[in-house]
Each structure stands twice: as C-alpha cells, then as structure tokens.
Image (spheres, rainbow, N blue to C red):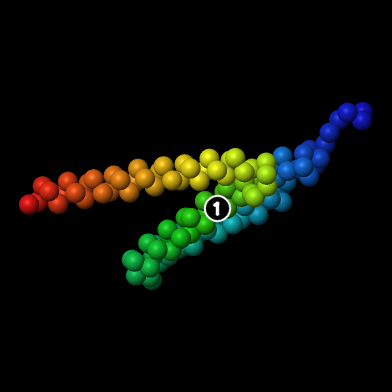
Amino acid sequence: MANHHSSDAHAEHGHGGGLKSYLVGFVLAVILTVIPFGMVMSGAFPRGVTVIVIAVLAAVQMLVHLIYFLHMDRSAEQRSNVHVGLFSLLIIGIVVVGSLWVMHNLNVNMMH
C-alpha cells in the first residue's frame, strides 16, 4: 500500500494544478470574457476604446490560460516550454506583420 500515490502528491510536485488553481483560472477567464462582452453589448464606450480593451483583456486572458491551465511558470522544468512559446509568438508575429506589409504594398502599387 505504500506504493500508491494520491493525486494530491502529484499536485504538490508541480505536475498539475489542483482544483483551486483550475477554479481561479476559470473565474478569471469568465471575468475577462464578460467585461468585453458587456462593453460591446452596452454600446456605452467609443469604438476605439472598446477595441483596445478587448485586445488588452484578450492578451491577459492568454496569460491566465498559460498560467492556470497549462501551468507554465518560471520554474526550470517549464523553461523549455516557455522558450518554445516565445519562439512561436515570434514566428506568428513575423508572419502576421509580413502579410500585412505585403498586402499594404500590393494595395499601394495597384492604386497608382
């Protein structure tokens, strides 16, 4: 019977979050979803402000998901995962910015 491990033992060693971690992440994710939804549905804010708030809260929500659901942190065990994530963001940024740049140049050259 000494060879059996409880699920709490795995949570203590950083192999996953406990129920509390998942609930905190879920509540934060719901709050970060409801705020922009309420802003859009109420129509009480200017469009520019609404777009900026949505973008900022979307970025915060991505961080909440990475921390509370994917358990990414600054520990040595997660360092390679963080590096892969940052590299992926770099590649996605290059593709998006490059595509916008190409489309802008095509538009400029086609209009003249």
User: Can residue 74 be seen from the camera position used here?
Assistant: yes
Whether residue 41 is visible here, answered yes or no, is: no
Name the foreground residue: 23 vs 105.
105
Residue 20 location in percent, x, y? Answer: 71, 51
The quadrant holding residue 79 is top right
Residue linked to disc 1: 63
- Above or below for 9 versus 38: above
Helix or strand or loop: what does disc 1 sit on? helix
Residue at screen point 61% across, 50% down: 67
Q: How many marks?
A: 1
Seen at 92% across and 28% down, the residue is: 1
Looking at this view, is 9 or 76 the one in front? 76
Query: Quick check: 14 left or right of 61?
Result: right
Q: Position of residue 35 (x, y in %)?
A: 49, 62
Image quadrant in which you'd find residue 15: top right
In the image, what residue type sits under mark 1? Leu
Assess disc 1: are there few (<14), some (14-19) or many (≥20) residues with their C-alpha within 10 Å of its C-alpha: some
Residue 108 horizontal/vertical position (percent): 14, 51
Residue shown at the point (77%, 39%) measured from the top left: 10
Q: Identify whether 87 is placed above or below 37.
A: above
**Is residue 88 toward the left or the right of residue 31 in the image?**
left
Of 38 and 70, nearer the camera is 70
Q: Residue at x 52, y 57 (%)?
A: 60
